[in-house]
Each structure stands twice: as C-alpha cells, then as structure tokens.
Image (cartoon, rainbow, N blue to C red):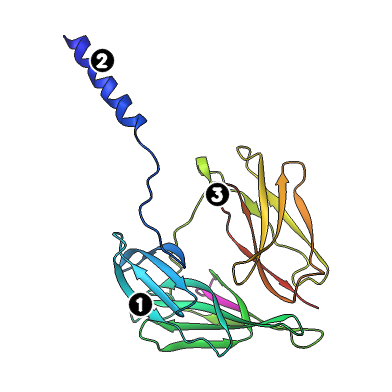
Amino acid sequence: MKRFALIVTLFACLTSGSQAQLALEHTYTGVSAAYIKLPIAGYKYYVMDVANKQCRFYNNDHSLWKTINLSIPANYFLCDIQYVTEDLFNTDNLIELLYVSYNYNTTLKYYTYDTRIVNENGSQLLGMPYAGYSYIYPAETGSKLFMWIYDFSVFPETVNTMVYSIPGKLNTLTTVSPNGLKSSLGSAYPNPTTSEVTIPYFLPSNIEQAELKLYAMNGEMVKSYAIDHTFDSILVKTSELPAGMYIYRVETNAYKSKSFKLAVSR
C-alpha cells in the first residue's frame, strides 16, 4: 500500500510539472513597458507612451496606478525614460524620472536632443537642451549625475559634460542571462565616432551565438551583427548613419544585455 501511494504521489508531481508552461499575463499595447521596485510604493510596471507623451504606472495586477504627463518641446518625440525613483533626485517621496526627447532634421540629417527631470506633479527639477545621454555614478562624495551635451548642428560638433551632485542612491532591478552568466560589452571607441567604431564584447560559455544590435533613439533597429566566440570585438561602420545618439546591446532569443549609448558625429 505504501509503495502504491508513493507511485501515485510521484505520478501526480510529474503530471503537474508537465503541464507547467509559459502563460501570457498581460499585453501593454502600443507602448514599451518595464518593471521597477520603488523604495516606497514597491514593485510597479511602467510604460512609455510616445503618442500621448506620458509615463503610466500599473500595479502588479496591471491596474492603472498613476499617470505622469510629460512636457515635450514642439516637434520633438519622446524616446527614453530613465531613473524612475522616489528618492534619487530629491527627498520629497514623489516619483521622479528622467526622460529624453529628440528632433530629427531631415534636410541636414542630424538629431537634436532634450533631457528633463520631473516630479510626478509636473514640476521640473532640471531641463537640459541638447542633452542626449545621462548616467549616474557612485562617488566618494555621493552619487553624481553626468549629462553629455551634443550639438550636431555645427561642425565640428560641440560636446560638453555637466556633472550634478544628487542626494539619493539608485534603486534598480537587474536582469541576468540564464544560469546567472552575464554577457558584457566594453566601451565603444572612439565615442563619439564619425566613420567607424570598435565595440568589445564577451559571451559566456553557455551562449554560442548572439547578435549585437544598434538602435536609433526612437527604437528603430539600424544595424545587426552576428557575434560568437571567434572574436572579442567587432568593427561597426557608421559613416552612412545620421549624426546623433544610438543605443547598442547584445541580444539572444532569451536575453538582452545592458544597453550602452554611442554618439555619431559628422
């Protein structure tokens, strides 16, 4: 009897496991979505709605929690939302975020960017025309916000770096590849670039082949290259690309690496 009970139990476990499968939980239509852990409000989904110029937040059951309307310059388009927090840029416990918009000059073929940091109530904490790339570094004297200011309307283009002290610490969710092995990208050089750029990379042993993809700031993929363990870097031709900011990362069917930004100048 005990042997029979054990067999029944094992059969039930195997049957239950065989029925486990991927299940679509929700679709956010027409927007790009991400997931974040806010220090006070906890885990939330948030979406970037380009058409309506909004950042919207959803609870874990996908019900709408909060909407932030974003002020975009005339003839610009929202292209990136970063650093969604409650205690990074100030200490008022309101949601803050950094967002980037762009304008593309179709005649002269260059991008112009605008970066702003706002509270959820619409108050602007910082506005920086021409800023297309921002990054936060931990520092000995507290966190530092770096903003790179590019003006591609002149030749040679002007590049300036603004450094801001900020009061908070960065809180983010990180994504790793299967088995905890990370693919990695080195710093592209030269950056900014004019005609070509070298991008170092590393693939973990459990990934035989991947793709290095280059995206415009509006999300359009402009170049894709197959990479494997044969080399540890790739030379990318940029001479035919419009001047502006681009994003590159390593992708497989199941994994996307951290994204890095590349400036193309003329």
Indicate the quadrant containing the N terminus: top left, top right, bottom left or bottom right. Answer: top left
121 or 185: nearer the eye?
Answer: 121
Residue 90 image position (x, y, % from top left): 41, 81
- Where residue 255 is drawn, which disc sits there? 3
- Label 3 sits on a secondary structure element that is loop
Q: Which amino acid, by three-letter code, is at mark 3?
A: Tyr
65 or 259: nearer the eye?
Answer: 65
Residue at screen point 47% across, 71% down: 83
Q: Which amino acid, by three-letter code, is at mark 2?
A: Ile
Quick one: label 2 or label 1, which is nearer the N terminus? Answer: 2
- Label 2 sits on a secondary structure element that is helix
Dot 3: within a 10 Å radius of its alpha carbon, few (fewer than 14), some, or many (20 or more) residues? some
Over which residues does the magenta segment extend? 140-147
Relative side of 13 to 246, left or right: left
Quick one: label 3 or label 2, which is nearer the N terminus? Answer: 2
Residue 179 image position (x, y, % from top left): 51, 40
Mark 2, residue position: 7
Q: Which amino acid, by three-letter code, is at mark 1?
A: Thr
**Corner quadrant of residue 129:** bottom right
Relative side of 40 to 177, left or right: left
Residue at screen point 62% across, 40% down: 207
Dot 2: within a 10 Å radius of its alpha carbon, few (fewer than 14), some, or many (20 or more) residues? few
Indicate the quadrant containing the C terminus: top left, top right, bottom left or bottom right. Answer: bottom right
Mark 1, residue position: 67
Residue at screen point 81% across, 86% down: 155
Please say whether residue 145 is one of the residues in the magenta stretch.
Answer: yes
* Alpha carbons under labels 2 and 1: distance apart: 54 Å
Please say whether residue 116 is one of the residues in the magenta stretch.
Answer: no
174 over 205 or under it: above or below: below
Residue at screen point 34% across, 31% down: 17
Residue 105 image position (x, y, % from top left): 70, 84
- Label 1 sits on a secondary structure element that is strand
